[in-house]
Amino acid sequence: MNITYLNSFIETVKQDSISKAAKDLHMTQSALSQQLQTLEKSLNANLLIRSNKGVILTDEGEIVLSYAEALVNLYDNMAKELDKHRRSELEEIKISACNCVGEYLLLCTLHLYKKNHSNIRFSLKTENSKTVIDNILDCTSDVGFIDIADHLKLDEIESFNICSNNLVFIFSSKKNLDKDAITLEEVSDMPLIIGSNRSSIRTITEKLFINNKISIDNLNIEMELDTIESIKASVAADHGVSIVPITAVKKEVYSGVLKTLPLSDATPSCNISMVYQKSRASQPHIKSFVSYIKKFGRETFC
C-alpha cells in the first residue's frame, strides 16, 4: 500500500475538498483524483462520495481513515527513527582552510575520501591562515590547512607540509603585454590589486617585494580585496594586475579570461601545510583522515 496515497486521502477528508487538498499537497486536482481512485481500487472499497460541494466519507471510508492515520503516524515515526540512526553513525570532521586551499585544492580530496568513507561528514570553512590557527587552538576545527609557515611555531599544534603552491603574475586578457617574463620592479609600477591585511596572500606578496629590496611604500596599490575570487574578477575587468597562486587561476587561464607571466627575478611560492592538535587527531575518524592527507594529500588536490 502506498503511504503517499493514504496521506492524500487523509488530507482530502481534512479539507473536505479534492481541489483544496490538491493545492495543499502541491499537485494537480486530476493527479490527486487518480491517487484516490487507485487507493479505492487496491482496497476494493468506495471511500468517498464526491459532489460539487465537496466529499463525504462512506462507512468504508470511516474505517479506512482510522487505520490510515495510524499507519501514517507509524510510518513517520519509523522514518524519523531511521534518520536518527543514520545521523548517529556519521562522524563529523570540522575543517578550516585558507582561501587558496579551501576554494581551489581541497574539494577534490574531500570528495575522494568521502567515496570510501561514507560514515564521514565534512564541514569546511575558508578563513585566513591566522584564523585557521585560532580555530585549531580553540578546537572550533579539527584539522586546518594554511599557507604561511610563520604560524607554525606553536607547541600546541602539529603540522605537516603537504606541498608548495607557486605564485604567478596575472593580468587581463584585454591587456597586451608583449613580454616573455616580467620583473618585480615592473610590477611595482603597475596598478596592483592585493589582498587585505588579514589575508595570507597579502603577507606572501609583501615579503616577495621586500626580499627583492622593493619598498612596500613604493607599490602602486590600486585596491585591497579580501578574497582571491574578488582579486581575479577585478584583474579580469582590467582594473589592475596581481600575484596569486597558480592553482587559483587555472580555469581562467585555460578559458582565456586571464593571462600569466613568469617573474624573471623571483620564483615565488608558498607552502601548504596541514595543522591539528595531537589530542584531537587521536580520535579514530580524525586520525584516519590525517593519515590519508599525509599519504595522498598532494596527489588528490584539485
Image (cartoon, rainbow, N blue to C red):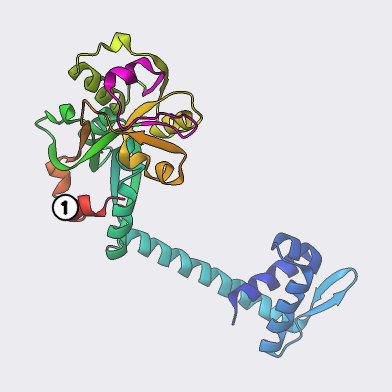
Residue 174 shows in the view:
yes
Q: Quadrant of the N terminus?
A: bottom right
Could you tell whether 178 is left or right of 42 in the image? left
Q: Count the marks: how many? A: 1
Task: Tell which residue pokes out farthest to the top in this image.
Answer: 217
| x 60%, y 79%: residue | 2
Q: Which residue is mark 1?
A: 287
| x 70%, y 73%: residue | 9
Pick the residue in front: 90 or 214: 214
Badge 1, how many Cα within 10 Å: few under 14, some, many 20+? some
Quarter holding residue 195: top left
Q: Relative to 229, is 150 above or below?
A: above
Residue 244 appears at what percent x and percent y? Answer: 33, 32
Q: Relative to 131, is 293 above or below?
A: below
Q: Relative to 219, is 259 above or below?
A: below
Residue 256 appears at what percent x and percent y? Answer: 45, 42
Residue 292 shows in the view:
no
Residue 248 appears at what percent x and percent y? Answer: 35, 40
Quarter holding residue 24: bottom right
As helix, strand or loop, the secondary structure at mark 1 comes to: helix
Could you tell whether 27 is left or right of 209 in the image? right
Task: Tell which residue pokes out farthest to the right in this image.
Answer: 52
Task: Tell which residue pokes out farthest to the left in this image.
Answer: 155
Pick the residue in front: 90 or 245: 245
Residue 57 appears at what percent x and percent y? Answer: 78, 76
Task: Tell which residue pokes out farthest to the front in this image.
Answer: 178
Pick the residue in front: 12 or 127: 127
Q: Is residue 153 magenta?
A: no
Q: Is residue 186 magenta?
A: yes
Quarter holding residue 187: top left
Q: Which residues are magenta?
A: 170-194
Three-letter amino acid code at disc 1? Lys
